[in-house]
Image (spheres, rainbow, N blue to C red):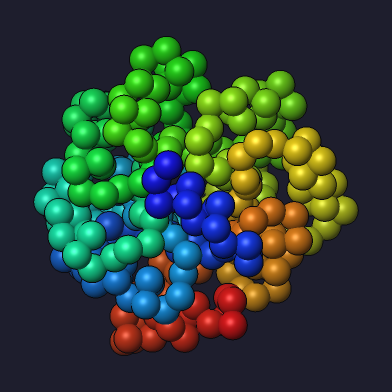
Amino acid sequence: MNRLNELFQNKKEPLLSIYFTAGYPDLNSTLDIAEAIEKAGADFMEIGFPYSDPLADGPVIQNSSQKALQNGMNLKILFEQLKELRKRVSIPVLLMGYVNPVLQYGVKNFCDSCAAVGVDGVIVPDLPMVEYEELYKDNFISNNISNIFLVTPQTSEERIRKIDDLSNGFIYLLSSSSTTGKNLTVSNEADAYFSRIREMNLKNPTMIGFGISDQKSFNKAAEYTRGAIVGSAFVKFLDTENALQRIPEFIKSIRP
């Protein structure tokens, strides 16, 4: 059991996770932002490692990834920064990004580095499930790293059940099949999708991401799942004046 498992086991209130891109807005802002997120009251966080071709991301996160790469961010530098992570942050921390940088870094090295700095889980949306199961699962399990899979409204029940069997953290429900940054659609279709997942009685908890930007969308997600993940809205906020000092203000706008 890692920090992530303990959080879901012990806290019953709706959970809030915040995503931001490592190296944005500045190369060395990662730990300052992470510490501020925890102090502001978020339950866990996802630190994105940038990639040059982030196909699933909308313009806000694409821009943050491009700026982070221009600033010089890469996995090697990120892990160097995260050596100080557990001196400043106690809540669960996940890394999120695309599979290409992970393969270049080496999956075993990646998992070993995550464990060494205190990362609790990883979200790699384009890592094929079959490759994870056949080639990489042991690297994650031996390092006590939760691998988080994504589900969309089009994901079949068979695949969701398989994801549930392979998961040991939570399951990330995409509010839609769109890119990041789109607003959560409160519709009969969305209600039916979230209800269908809830009625499957999965063994792993679920969180909703993509389109969570305010208290209304957070509360909507919490009706069906354990909570929600805020990404694009927070990354966009980081581009405003005195954003670091105003992170508590942002968190309270989502979950007072």
* Quadrant position of the N terminus in the picture: top left
The picture places residue 177, in percent across and down from the top left corner, at 64, 42
Figure quadrant of residue 218: bottom right
The picture places residue 169, in percent across and down from the top left corner, at 50, 41
The picture places residue 203, in percent across and down from the top left corner, at 65, 36
Q: Up-down: is 222 above or below 147?
A: below
Residue 16 in view here: yes
Q: Up-down: is 24 above or below 225?
A: below
Q: Say which of 218 and 2 sits in front.
A: 2
Residue 174 in view here: no
Q: Up-down: is 175 above or below 238?
A: above
Q: Say which of 179 and 81 sits in front.
A: 81
Horizontal side, residue 1 vs residue 179: left or right: left
Residue at the limit of the structure toward the top, as seen here: 134
Figure quadrant of residue 161: top right
- Seen at 45% across and 31% down, the residue is 126
